[in-house]
Image (spheres, rainbow, N blue to C red):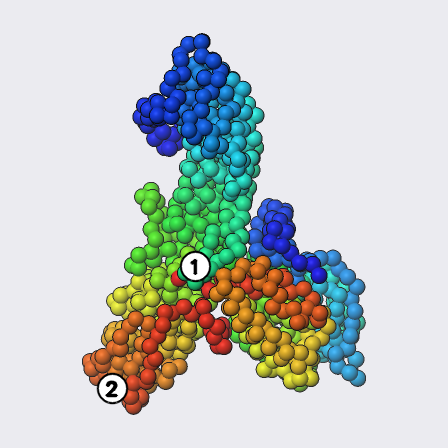
């Protein structure tokens, strides 16, 4: 397992910073990027799209599309489909084709962005140009209207053209009826960014968790944009309270997660949060925390947590800014 | 003469320095160097206790004739004393062109870096002596060399020391206008005192230096040379925000008029608009600029920012690190808006400006503290007197503010929450109380502790660290009862004695509120 010394970590960060400086990227981008690749939400090349039915015996009713930068859920509707997240712009064409094939409708009438990162919002422009409704948190609308920096990838993202920006926003929670089913979309404050939404299909026992959850690895905190470890803990508490053990959770990337697994991860993050306070009071730096391996019991399942721990611990320094 | 103020100061002190140098030379045992051609190189390079040679002392004292004499006598122009200083570094420090010329002619390196890579050009850049810098550049000094301690360049030094003409020269010779100094990623943020501290992260650019140091002419030079006016520091502080945070309103204005991004937020979620209102804090000792040359004002900057599209509803992620808890920081938590900050100042002019630009009176902090409550929070850094708070309340009410919102306990802010009426009651601000009741405040609403405004008037409120229990205020009790207040506790709750409020040092199973 690759472990980073402070020197290697900083050197990597500086190299990225040097490359990114001309585009205005911030240090924290470099720090995060130095700790893992590819970063969550980073722009990248298109890949082939795979489709998996989420609803058995009802082909195309709800389909999971993977390989386009993030997990995309397509829901068949009478006047067009509903998409939760739109993948990378480079994958948008292939994704929308796959969605059309799965749902039998070429038009996307509604797109919900779970957050503003490029891997979620790459289809906004195509959907917007076709007159589709784009739903997001108000913060997502704000970020997409400008060049935004992130801890999750080097450089900046945006502004997207006006037609690609959300047309309906919420700051808290809202819902819609789509193809006869109730859909809730609700704010998860400060979890992965500062504008995360989860999308709940209660009648289908399906929860699209967005950025705070990755299927088979640790999440990433965009601490440049308001995410912090306490918000992540609260997000898991919220998701665990909604989910039954058999609820299927669609993460931002990676395989589906059960409600039981979400409850387990909630416990992990709650325990970690307490442990970070212990480290905090001992005067640990982020490297010390990584070296202490507080998550070693879960590394076999979820991989090297160095990048996650770095962001989580640094977020404490921001949240607990001294007197 | 292209010298800046530090060079002029140096020139004025030259005579005194020469006398001092002669004295020190004598003390250092170097006064016996014979004049004339008969001195041996060994004698000429005789070192004092700190390793300095007579040439170094002569350079330090800006004694051109003596420097000339010593060089002729065979003085080592590259000698380094125990501090790593060469004659060229000492000459560059005072920006003495004549001596630099002599040293170069005698073979001294135009770079003459010390052990940390600090070059003669950097030192000269700091003095503002353009002629001396030209001389070094003509002899091949590297314009983009970086010292290794901070990774700073000569251009950064010139910007930080208000030398626009020097900057012009350096840029004309290829200085990178967007160069960034070294970043600092401190491992430890907790001191022996047992609490976290913030550290500067470095990573400044020439424009950030100029913005911080209030050098408008330097900013002009950089803009003329197509600097990236939005390139932030590693924490995301944009140049305009840095200017604003230092109350350098003229620089901020120049950057705004040059088209800078008026919505670039930093890692704390603070944009230029919030920073302007925060720093412009009228009555609570807001940090004013020490430089009297500002023509622009906070209000002008707020107006300009809004006019250029600043988002009045941008919310903070965290309390910015430049705001200690004892200042307005005590008011601030996740979700704070420019409107909340302006309301806390009782700045009705800015409140009106923000509302006219679309500020949402229904955007609250994470613990649901509202603009109305902010106006009623002078003890936590807000600057409002009751008179000003009442003026703000009227404006907020006209904009549709809800006076019955309940804010929650917030351990880090050390607040117990409550209703706006409870806030006003705690202050004893009867006019504000009357206004709130007139606007429909529920006089019997309970807070998270189960207390009503009447309980606070009876002195039953939470007793914070180092505070004593409040006695009943019967005039407030009568007022509230006259407005229909009937709900109160049977007795004062037991408030356990509080220790120092080191909220961040203790894990609480209840993470403080984050919701909108």
Q: Chain of mark 1?
A: B
Quadrant of the frame with the N terminus of chain B: top left
The answer for how far apart the CA atoms under marks 2 and 1 are is 52 Å
Asked if residue A34 lies left or right of residue B230, the reply is: right
Is residue B128 shown above or below B254?
above
Residue B184 visible to the viewer: yes
Chain letter for mark 2, please.
B
Please tell me which residue is depicted at 69% across the width and 66% down the height of the picture.
A303
Identify which residue is drawn at 77% across, 77% down.
A53
Residue B351 shows up from this direction: no
Nearer to us in this view, B377 or B322: B322
Q: Which mark is residue A292?
A: none
From the viewer's side, name the closer residue of B442 and B38.
B38
Task: From the top left corner, tell me how far across and down residue A179 is, in percent.
Answer: 69, 81
- Where residue B481 is drawn, which disc sits there? 2
Residue B158 drawn at (x, y percent):
46, 36
The residue most toward the left is: B475
Q: Quadrant of residue B431?
A: bottom left
User: Alpha-carbon neighbours of circle 2 within 10 Å: few (<14), some, or many (≥20)?
Assistant: some
Q: Earlier in the sequence, mark 2 or mark 1?
A: 1
Label 2 element class: helix
Question: In the image, is residue B437 above or below residue A300?
Answer: below
In the image: residue B280, left or right of residue A252:
left
For residue B192, the mark is: 1
Viewer-nearest of discs 2 and 1: 1
Question: Relative to A4, is B34 on the left or the right?
Answer: left
Task: Establish whether labels 2 and 1 are both on one chain.
Answer: yes
Residue B127 screen position, x and y as percent: 42, 31
Q: Position of residue B195 (x, y in %)?
A: 43, 62
């Amino acid at each position: 397992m690759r472990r980073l010394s402070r020197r290697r970590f900083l050197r990597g960060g500086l190299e990225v910073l040097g490359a990114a400086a001309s585009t205005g990227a911030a240090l924290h981008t470099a720090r995060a990027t130095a700790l893992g690749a590819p970063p969550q939400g980073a722009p990248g090349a298109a890949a082939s799209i795979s489709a998996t039915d989420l609803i058995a015996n009802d082909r195309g009713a709800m389909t999971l599309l993977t390989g386009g930068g993030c997990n995309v859920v397509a829901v068949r509707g009478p006047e067009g489909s509903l998409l939760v997240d739109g993948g990378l712009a480079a994958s948008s064409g292939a994704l929308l084709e796959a969605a059309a094939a799965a749902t039998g409708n070429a038009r996307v009438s509604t797109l919900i962005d779970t957050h503003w990162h490029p891997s979620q919002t790459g289809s906004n422009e195509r959907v917007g140009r076709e007159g589709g409704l784009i739903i997001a948190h108000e913060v997502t609308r704000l970020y997409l209207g400008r060049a935004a920096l992130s801890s999750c990838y080097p450089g900046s993202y945006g502004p997207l053209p006006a037609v690609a920006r959300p047309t309906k926003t919420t700051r808290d929670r809202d819902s819609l009826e789509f193809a006869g089913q109730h859909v809730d979309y609700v704010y998860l404050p400060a979890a992965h960014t500062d504008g995360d939404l989860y999308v709940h299909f209660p009648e289908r026992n399906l929860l699209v968790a967005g950025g705070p959850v990755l299927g088979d690895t640790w999440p990433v905190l965009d601490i440049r944009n308001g995410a912090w470890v306490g918000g992540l803990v609260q997000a898991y508490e919220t998701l665990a309270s909604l989910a039954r053990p058999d609820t299927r959770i669609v993460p931002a990337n990676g395989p589906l997660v059960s409600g039981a697994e979400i409850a387990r991860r909630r416990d992990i993050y709650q325990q970690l949060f307490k442990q970070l306070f212990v480290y905090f009071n001992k005067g640990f730096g982020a490297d010390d925390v990584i070296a202490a391996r507080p998550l070693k019991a879960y590394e076999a399942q979820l991989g090297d947590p160095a990048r996650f721990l770095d962001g989580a611990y640094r977020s404490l320094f921001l949240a607990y800014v001294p007197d | 003469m292209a010298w800046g103020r530090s060079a002029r100061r140096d020139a004025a002190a030259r005579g005194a320095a020469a006398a001092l140098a002669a004295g020190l030379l004598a003390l250092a045992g170097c006064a016996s160097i014979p004049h004339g051609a008969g001195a041996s190189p060994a004698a000429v390079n005789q070192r004092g206790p700190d390793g300095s040679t007579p040439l170094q002392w002569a350079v330090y004292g800006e004694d051109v004739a003596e420097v000339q004499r010593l060089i002729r006598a065979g003085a080592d122009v590259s000698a380094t004393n125990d501090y790593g200083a060469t004659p060229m570094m000492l000459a560059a420090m005072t920006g003495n062109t004549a001596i630099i010329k002599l040293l170069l002619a005698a073979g001294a390196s135009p770079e003459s870096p010390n052990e940390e890579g600090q070059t003669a050009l950097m030192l000269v850049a700091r003095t503002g002596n353009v002629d001396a810098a030209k001389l070094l550049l003509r002899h091949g000094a590297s314009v983009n060399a970086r010292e290794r301690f901070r990774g700073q360049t000569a251009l950064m030094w010139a910007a930080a020391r208000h030398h626009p003409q020097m900057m012009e020269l350096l840029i004309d010779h290829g200085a990178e206008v967007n160069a960034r100094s070294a970043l600092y990623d401190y491992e430890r943020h907790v001191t022996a005192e047992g609490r976290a501290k913030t550290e500067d992260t470095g990573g400044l650019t020439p424009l950030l230096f100029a913005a911080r140091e209030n050098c408008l002419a330097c900013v002009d030079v950089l803009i003329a040379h197509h600097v990236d006016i939005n390139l932030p520091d590693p924490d995301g502080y944009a140049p305009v925000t840095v200017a604003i945070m230092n109350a350098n309103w003229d620089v901020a204005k120049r950057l705004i008029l040059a088209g800078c991004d008026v919505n670039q937020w930093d890692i704390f979620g603070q944009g230029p608009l919030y920073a302007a209102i925060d720093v412009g804090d009228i009555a609570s000792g807001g940090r004013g600029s020490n430089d009297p040359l500002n023509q622009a004002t906070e209000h002008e900057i707020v107006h300009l920012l809004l006019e250029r599209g600043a988002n009045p509803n941008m919310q903070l992620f965290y309390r910015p690190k430049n705001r200690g808890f004892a200042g307005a920081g005590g008011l601030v938590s996740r979700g704070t808006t420019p409107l909340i900050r302006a309301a806390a100042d009782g700045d009705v002019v800015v409140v009106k400006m923000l509302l006219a630009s679309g500020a949402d009176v229904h955007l609250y902090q994470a613990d649901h503290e509202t603009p109305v409550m902010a106006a009623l929070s002078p003890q936590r850094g807000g600057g409002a007197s009751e008179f000003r708070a009442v003026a703000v309340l009227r404006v907020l009410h006209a904009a549709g503010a809800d006076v019955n919102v309940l804010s929650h306990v917030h351990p880090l802010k050390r607040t117990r929450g409550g209703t706006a009426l409870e806030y006003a009651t705690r202050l004893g601000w009867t006019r504000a109380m009357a206004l709130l009741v007139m606007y429909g405040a529920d006089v019997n609403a309970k807070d998270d502790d189960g207390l009503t405004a009447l309980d606070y008037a009876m002195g039953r409120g939470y007793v914070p660290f180092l505070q004593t229990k409040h006695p009943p205020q019967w005039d407030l009790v009568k007022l509230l009862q006259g407005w229909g207040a009937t709900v109160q506790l049977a007795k004062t709750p037991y408030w356990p004695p509080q220790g120092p409020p080191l909220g961040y040092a203790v894990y609480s199973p209840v993470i403080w509120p984050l919701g909108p």
